[in-house]
Image (cartoon, helix red, strand yellow):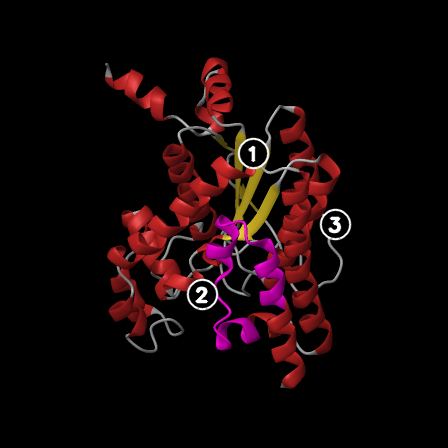
């Protein structure tokens, strides 16, 4: 086997494929991965494209592990972003209206179904609370509309039980980028950062080894989902949609009644972090029960 043949065998990126390679990847596993991110300040120590870079890398690794499927080019742009240099804000994070991201995702999902994909995974590496709500809500609605399962989630939801609760340029994200794209993290730059360099917590806690631990779990679960989602029947898809909508409802309720991150605060402080494990085991009713516990904790406080 030549080097070129080996590269073609492992090719999963849509934009790099020849038509025959695309057909072979879809035949092997008719699942498409859609990574999302933005360009945004992530401290002096991280590359500005961190969100989409890590989401795309995780999707490619998952497709390779699953033995098929296609990874769409990463989409840079979404809801929210820090008021910092070199940051592009497409839509305001605190707006209830959404005019760009939602129809953009809906159209892509429709195209994926038209092209013969039997499942889709939308993985957002950008964590604005409204970004997460819109991605999950669109995926659930398009699952019903297209009658193919579509998952929309931030990548850290698949590794919460490993201690990765999502952060912004903190120990978790920095560790992931250190593992996925080592040249794009320069920890020494933290000494020049008045925000992230206030303490040595990131410098001491972030590592490529930790990033690998998170990435391995996320990739393993993404690959399992890609293989199983195409086999879900009507009952499984309906149960999946109910569980996803339950989380959206809890998040929107927390936003309306308390503050934008209320649901997340309850989830993390209450250690309700088993979503990833329950999802890959297709325990959708248990996910709904988890949301009920989340809502109960909100009502008690």
Q: Earlier in the sequence, mark 3 or mark 1?
A: 3
- Kind of element beneath mark 2: loop
Q: Is residue 229 left or right of residue 61?
A: right
Task: Please tell me which residue is depicted at 46% across the width and 57% down the height of the picture.
Answer: 156
Q: Residue at x 38, y 74 (%)?
A: 194
Q: CA distance from mark 3 to mark 1?
A: 30 Å
Q: Is residue 258 left or right of residue 277?
A: right
On the question of residue 11 being in view, the answer is yes
Which picture quadrant has residue 264? bottom right
Position of 277 relative to 144 (above/below):
below
Magenta region includes residue 269: yes
Which mark is nearer the camera, 2 or 3?
2
Query: Splitting the image into 4 quarters, where does residue 104 fall?
Result: top right
Q: Nearer the viewer, mark 3 or mark 1?
A: 1
Task: Report helix, strand or loop for mark 3.
Answer: loop
Mark on residue 134?
A: none
Q: Which residues, given as a range, are shown in magenta?
A: 265-291
Q: Give the mark nearest the N terminus, 1 or 2.
A: 2
Query: Which mark, by number, is residue 99?
Result: 3
Residue sitting at x 71%, y 35%: 146
Give 134 or 296, whichever is nearer the viewer: 296
Question: Which residue was labeled with disc 2?
Answer: 165
């Amino acid at each position: 086997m030549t080097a070129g043949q080996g590269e073609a065998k492992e090719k999963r990126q849509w934009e790099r494929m020849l038509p025959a390679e695309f057909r072979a990847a879809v035949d092997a596993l008719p699942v498409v991965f859609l990574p999302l991110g933005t360009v945004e300040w992530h401290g002096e120590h991280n590359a500005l494209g961190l969100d989409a870079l890590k989401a795309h890398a995780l999707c490619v690794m998952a497709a390779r592990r699953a033995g098929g499927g296609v990874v769409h080019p990463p989409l840079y742009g979404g809801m929210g972003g820090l008021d910092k240099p070199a940051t592009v804000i497409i839509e305001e994070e605190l707006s209830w209206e959404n005019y760009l991201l939602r129809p953009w995702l809906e159209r892509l999902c429709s195209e994926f179904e038209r092209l013969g994909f039997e499942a889709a995974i939308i993985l957002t590496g950008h964590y604005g609370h409204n970004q997460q709500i819109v991605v999950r809500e669109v995926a659930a609605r398009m699952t019903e509309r297209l009658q193919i399962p579509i998952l929309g989630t931030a990548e850290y939801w698949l590794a919460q039980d490993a201690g990765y609760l999502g952060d912004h340029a903190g120990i978790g994200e920095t560790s992931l980028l250190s593992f996925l794209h080592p040249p794009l993290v320069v920890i020494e730059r933290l000494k020049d950062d008045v925000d992230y360099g206030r303490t040595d917590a990131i410098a001491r806690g972030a590592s490529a080894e930790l990033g690998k631990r998170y990435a391995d779990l996320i990739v393993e679960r993404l690959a399992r989902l890609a293989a199983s989602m195409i086999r879900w029947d009507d009952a499984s898809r309906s149960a999946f949609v109910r569980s996803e909508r339950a989380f959206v409802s809890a998040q929107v309720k927390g936003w309306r009644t308390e503050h934008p991150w209320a649901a997340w605060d309850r989830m993390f402080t209450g250690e309700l972090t088993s979503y990833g494990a329950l999802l890959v085991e297709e325990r959708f009713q248990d996910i709904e029960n988890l949301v009920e516990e989340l809502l109960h904790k909100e009502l008690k406080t």
